[in-house]
Amino acid sequence: IGVLLYDPHAVLTAGLWLSFVAVAALILGSGVVGRALPMRAFLSTQISVSVAMVPATALLFGSVSLVAPFANLLAIPLFSGLLVPGTLLGVALMPATGLSNSVLGVTARLFEFTWSALEWAANLPGGWLHVAAPGPGLALLLCASALVLITPLPMRVRVPGLVLFAALVGSEAARPPIGAFTLTALDVGQGLSVVVRTRTHVLLFDAGPAFRSGRSAGELAVVPYLQHEGISHIDMLVTSHPDSDHTGGAPAIEQALAVVTARHGGETRRGHQIPSAPCRRGEAWIWDEVRFEFLHPAADETWSDNDSSCVLSIAAGATRALLTGDIEHAAEERLVMRADLARTDIVVVPHHGSRSSSSEAFVSRVQPRVAIVSAGAGNRWHFPHEVVVERWCRSGAEVISSADWGAITIAADSGRGLTGARSQRLEQRRYWQAPSPLAGRSRCLGAPGPAKAVYAPDGAVSSAAVSAIYH
């Protein structure tokens, strides 16, 4: 209560939950051990802490440490018995500089040893179990089963709790069926990062921007999202072209997650430790009955920076999506001239909705049902430009923007077509966030072209009913 009175926003930090959950587990665990022998009591309390940490780390980080019970055997006694008391004693002795320095020096060396041991344990192969962050219902069940395990209840109650606990920890997030994919345009501000997931594979198209602070959207948005979804590796990382708003987050992503292979547009990325090659027109592959194919650039072509962007087509049966990077009119014209550019259900609008892209010929050729704009709210370039929005609307598309919707997720199925469009701003509303009037709605409302429902909280698009309401 004191911490929250001093800093109400502390409730949003991982540190508060980890610290207070651990202390609560120690208090509750002490009721289980009772008058047990000291070593047994010590081990039981450490187990209590490890069990209590599972719901917290699964919810906060999308992972569970399998080495934590063993690491805590070293860490908790050292921090509780030596490191924290030693630090406090050293501070208290500061008027006696020499003595204070001696105490703090010994404490610092002990801390360095402890930290090195913990880093070694954290990096052990198989030391982490990546799980999808549970939804509210599963989270409550997981917390309840953990509470049953660490409180002094009869064994006949704790055994079912253990079974439920193990089942929940081992559960996986729902994945697309064979022949389907989900496309999520993450909210990375003025940049682009799109996650495409099939039944057993993950492709990441662009990594979001880097910031002057030294941090990046890769660290702050992309990696947390992937971990939240229980994704521990990326089968292919595509960086469409070298601009920093598309590649800035790549180093953080590569450091946090295993990347199997990479493709890039424009100049080759130097110092890349992952098998990498330029994306080339004609390269195609199939994952879980979903076809991926690069449509641009061709190997014998030379383009400007933006027009060198990789263009990727994704098809689940007759349902298609098109990822375009920052291509402009010249590359669009070349794509239109080729027969392999077909009508598309979902298109990520080129170059964030710039007037230098989305030519009449290109828009007329692809004629999507949904046109997604990845742009920062209030960006200084005023993306997407009104003329571009109007052009996509006239083609019959619903124009939706990450600036309005937050992260945008659409599911595509070879049999059912598009089965949902979801808005993170609507599904994860927070009282401290400014409302977004266009969250869940198309920017085509009131503009030429049809007005259809795009947001589908139940996972199914029902255009007709909501269309009447919008009109």
Image: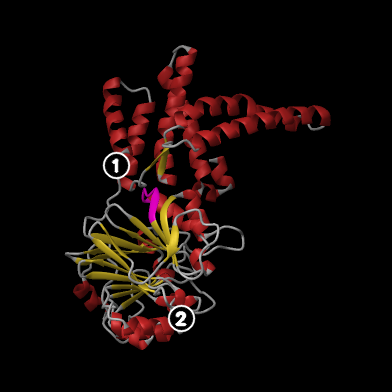
The tag on residue 354 is 2
**Residue 193, label in figure:** none
Q: Residue at x 27, y 30 (%)?
A: 163
Q: Residue at x 33, y 48 (%)?
A: 135
Q: Residue at x 22, y 55 (%)?
A: 177
Percent position (x, y) of residue 242? Answer: 51, 68
Furthest toward the front, the residue is 300
Q: Is 213 left, or right, of 89 in this rendering?
A: left
Q: Amino acid at mark 1?
A: Ser
* Magenta-drawn stretch contains 260: no
Callout 2 amino acid = Ser
* Residues marked 1 and 2 touching at CB (< 8 Å): no
Residue 204 lies in quadrant? bottom left
Query: Dot 1, crowdedness within 10 Å: few (<14), some or many (≥20)?
Result: few
Q: Position of residue 411 (x, y in %)?
A: 27, 63
Whether residue 66 is visible to the viewer of this picture, yes or no, is yes
Give whichever of discs 1 and 2 has the lower sequence position.
Answer: 1
Rendered location of residue 229, percent (x, y)? 36, 51
Task: Please rate how many residues cluster around mark 2, counting C-alpha atoms within 10 Å: few if below 14, some from 14 to 19, many from 20.
Answer: many
For residue 114, above or below residue 293: above
Stretch of the chain drawn in magenta: 229-235
Can you say whether 319 is above or below 105 in the image? below
215 vs 391, left or right, is right
Q: Is 269 or 128 nearer to us in this picture?
A: 269
> SS class of the residue under badge 1?
loop
Q: Hey, which quadrant is residue 405 in on the image?
A: bottom left
Q: Secondary structure at mark 2?
A: loop
Examine the rendering and report whether any part of residue 96 can be seen.
Answer: no
Q: Which mark is residue 171?
A: 1
Q: Quadrant of the C terminus?
A: bottom left
Residue 238: x, y in percent?
42, 63
- Of residues 313 and 176, which is closer to you in this image? 313
